[in-house]
Amino acid sequence: MRRTLCLLLLALLALPMGAKEKERVRPDDWKKVHYAKDEILPDAKIGEGMATVRACVLGMKPDKKLTLFIGNYTPLDAPHDFEGMFPIDDGTVEAQVPVRLTRQVLVLIPELEEAVAMVLVAPGEVTEMLIDLEAEGCPFIDFRGFMARTNKECTDDFWETLQHRKTDDLKLYDELNKQETPDQRVQFFKARLEAKKSAINKRRLTSASKALLRMEAENDYRSWTIYFARNYIDLQERTGAEPRIVDSEAYMKKLSEYEQMMPPSSLMATIPDNDAFEMTSRRYAPASPAFWAYNHWYGNACDPYTAQLRLLQTVLTDKILHLTDKLREEITLPDHVAILQAYDDGQERKREDFNRQAGVFFHTLDSVPAKDILPALLNRYKGRVVLFDIWATWCGPCRQGHRLMAPMKEELKDKPVTFVYLTCDTSPAGTWDEMIKDIPGEHYYLTKEQYYSLLEHYNSGGVPTYGLYDADGVEKWTRIGVPDVNQLKAKILESLP
C-alpha cells in the first residue's frame, strides 16, 4: 500500500497543466466508442470469478518495457492488499483481478508516472481501456465494457482535480487559517462537504459517477475531521508554507500542537447519523474505496449486508486485536459465512504446506496463550543458546540485520546456538515464505496477540527486536533496532555452556 501511494504521489507531481489533446490514430475497434446514457452503481452482492481488465496501449516504443499495475484495495476474501503487476506485450495486456464485489481500483503504469486512473471492476465483468502514451493530457482516453461511461467520467474528473491541486491546496490552507476556533473548523468542513455534494449533483454525469464522487467527498471530510493534525501538516508541506518535517520527534511535537486546533471533543460534532453518510449506509457503497477506508466505523452502516461485509474484512485482516472471535459470531449471512469458511479452509491448506518445511512453524503455537508464548518458545530450546529475532517482511532494518548477521551465523554454525525468527500476519504469508528461504534458522508465524506480547516483554514499540538467552533460558541481552554484530557475537560466545 505504501508503495502504491508513493506511485500515486509521483503521478500528482508530474501532471501537465491545461494540456490539450492532440489527434490520435486509433485501432479500428476503438474508432467508435458508444457510452450509455446513464449508469447506476450496482448494490453490493458477493459474486464468483475474477474481473478481467484489458488495455490497449498506443505509442508504445518497441524497446520500452511497461507494466500495468492494478491494486490499492484488499480483496474481500484476502487478509492483505492486492498489488498486481502485468507486463504489457506488443501494446496490449489482459489481467485477471481477484474481486468478489464491484470495486473501484487504482490502475497505473509505474514506468510512466502520469498514467494513473481509478476504474470500476466486478467479478465476471470485462473492463477495457484505451491508453495513449503520446497524449498531452490524461493517457486513459476511452473505456469500454463494464461501467464504461462512469470510468471515463471518473478518470477525467480525477485528472481535472490533479491539475488544479496546487491552487486548491493554497485556497484550502488560506480558508482554514481564517477559522479561529475548533467549532468554526467543524462548521467549515461541514459547509465544505455540503458545497461539494451540491456541485456534484448539478453536473452532467452518470448516477454512478455522482455517487462515487459524493462518497469521495465524504471520505475527505472524514479524513480531515478525524486526522486533522496529520492532514494539516501534509497541507503545509504541499503548499510550501512549512518545510517537510524529517525528524520523528519534531513531527510528533507538531502533531500534538495541531491536535488542539481540532481536539477530540470537537470530533463528536462531526459524527453523522447512521443514514447521513452515503459511504456508510447505502447498499452500493462498497464499490467506493471510501466505504473501506474506516473499518472501525462498520457500526454506522444501516444495511445489514454491507455492515457484515465490513465486519468480514475486519475479521480477515485481523484489524481489531482480541475481538476477532467475537466479531466472527456476528457474521451470519450465508454469502459472508461462505467467504469466511473458504478463507479458513485455505489457511488450513497453507498451514499444512508451510509446516512440511524443516524449521518452519506456521501457526503451530496458536493454542498457546499470548502471555505464555515466551516460556513456550524457550522450552523448545533447552540446552542451547537461542537468539530471538522479532521481525516483519516489510521492515527494512530487519532485512539489514539479517544481512549483517549472515557471516556471524556461518562462523557459529558448529556451536550450540539457534537463531529463531518470529513474525505474524502483519507480514503477508506468501512474502514471508519466500524470504525465509534465504534466512537460515527456525521460523515461527505467530498470532498477533503472541507477537505483540513478545514486543511488550521487551518494552519495544517496533521491529527489529532481539532477545538472547543462555542454555538455561536466562535472558542475557536484548536490543531494539539493528545491533552491532561484533557486540552480539561477543554476547553469544559469553552465553555458551
Image (cartoon, helix red, strand yellow):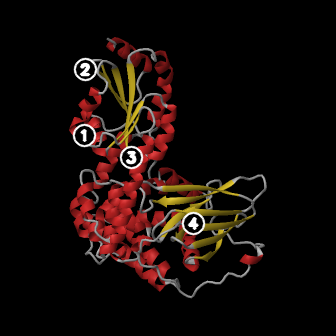
Q: Earlier in the sequence, mark 2 or mark 1?
A: 1
Frontmost of labels 3 and 4 is 3
Q: Earlier in the sequence, mark 2 or mark 3?
A: 3
For the C terminus, the quadrant is top left
Q: Residues within 10 Å of mark 4 (few under 14, many from 20)?
A: many
Q: Amino acid at mark 1?
A: Val
As measured in the structure, the alpha-carbon distance from the residue carrying label 2 to the one carrying label 3 is: 29 Å
Q: Which residue is mark 1?
A: 368
Q: Earlier in the sequence, mark 1 or mark 4?
A: 4
As measured in the structure, the alpha-carbon distance from the residue carrying label 3 to the one carrying label 1 is: 19 Å
Frontmost of labels 4 and 2 is 2
Q: Write down the quadrant of residue 283 in the picture.
A: bottom left
Residue at 26% of width from left, 60% of height from top? 327
Q: Looking at the image, can residue 283 be seen?
A: yes
As measured in the structure, the alpha-carbon distance from the residue carrying label 1 to the one carrying label 4 is: 46 Å
Q: What SS does tag 1 mark? A: loop
Q: Is residue 388 above or below residue 343?
A: above
| Label disc, if present, on residue 474 of the rendered structure | 2
Q: Residues within 10 Å of mark 1 (few under 14, many from 20)?
A: some
Frontmost of labels 2 and 1 is 1
Q: Looking at the image, can residue 394 be seen?
A: no
Q: Residue furthest bottom?
A: 37
As measured in the structure, the alpha-carbon distance from the residue carrying label 4 to the one carrying label 2 is: 56 Å
Q: Write down the quadrant of residue 446 in the picture.
A: top left
Q: Is residue 208 above or below residue 431?
A: below
Q: Which residue is mark 4?
A: 117
Q: Position of residue 353 (x, y in %)?
A: 45, 44
Q: Which residue is mark 3?
A: 426
Q: Write down the quadrant of residue 342 in the picture.
A: bottom left
In the rendered view, does 386 fall on the left or right side of 414? left
157 or 301, which is in the foreground?
Answer: 301
